[in-house]
Image: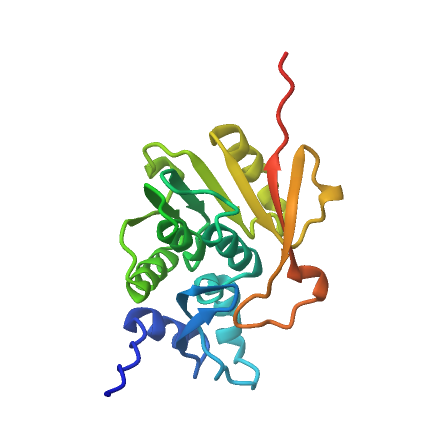
Amino acid sequence: MAQENPPLPPAPLARHLAGLIPGASLCATILPLAPALRLWLLGPNVPARPLAPAAAAQLQDTPPYWAFCWASGHALAAEILTGRVPVAGKRIVDFGTGSGVVALAAARAGAAAVYAVDEDPLALAAVRANARLNGIEGVETVPSLDAVPTYDLLLLADVLYDPANRPLVDDLRARAPSLFVADARVPPAQLTGWRCLGAQEAATLPDLDESPLFRTVRFYQPEATPEA
């Protein structure tokens, strides 16, 4: 029986990544916590030598977040696919989508509509490429939440790591009909007004050898506001 040819990485994204990190490539990677999904991620053949100063500066200015499956997105996708975060029949927003792993999991789990939101056009291209890789349809890529007509649940993964994002999260909390957050960087004691629903051990892919402290992903929802 003939073996199926491996899929080819999306050429524009592969060229962009190789321009940032000479010798780097994209690899179709199965997610350990969500094996029903594969993503185009940074492959294992990353050169060990230091980058030239100009290349390092460009990489810092335009990091390819979409070429990683970050720990919180990895864990949240698993929670969605196992049904512990119910999305079936709902209109879902994956805000700051990156690779699109959370959006793809929501679509695979039966969401009525899925919007992958990211201001980086390369991230949106990665979401579309990852959707094709998994044979998933119905994920709409948009650059802003303002482009989403209506939705039931907003999902956030890996946004609280930067304190500068806190005002944005507070704004989204005020706007969204329902909000669910996955985060591996901020412990519950540092979050006022949020309820911790549980935790899941997860790693970023490819593995960045992060501190064990950053491999515990916690899930949060806003605490109910007391009625006046």
Picture layout, residue 186 above or below residue 66: above
> Residue drawn 50% across and 82% down?
46
Given the current orientation, which residue lies at the most extreme top position? 228
Q: Quadrant of the N terminus?
A: bottom left
Give the percent coordinates (x, y) of residue 76: 52, 53
Give left or right: position of 85 versus 161.
left
Q: Quadrant of residue 184?
A: bottom right
Q: Quadrant of residue 99?
A: bottom left
Picture layout, residue 9 above or below residue 158: below
Label count reads 0
> Residue drawn 65% across and 62% down?
215
Q: Quadrant of the C terminus?
A: top right
Given the current orientation, which residue lies at the most extreme right position? 189
Of residue 165 and residue 215, the one placed in the foreground of this image is 215
Picture layout, residue 77 above or below residue 175: below
> Residue drawn 52% across and 47% down?
84
Give left or right: position of 149 versus 160.
left
Of residue 31 and residue 82, the one placed in the foreground of this image is 82
Picture layout, residue 108 above or below residue 49: above
> Residue drawn 38% across and 38% down?
90
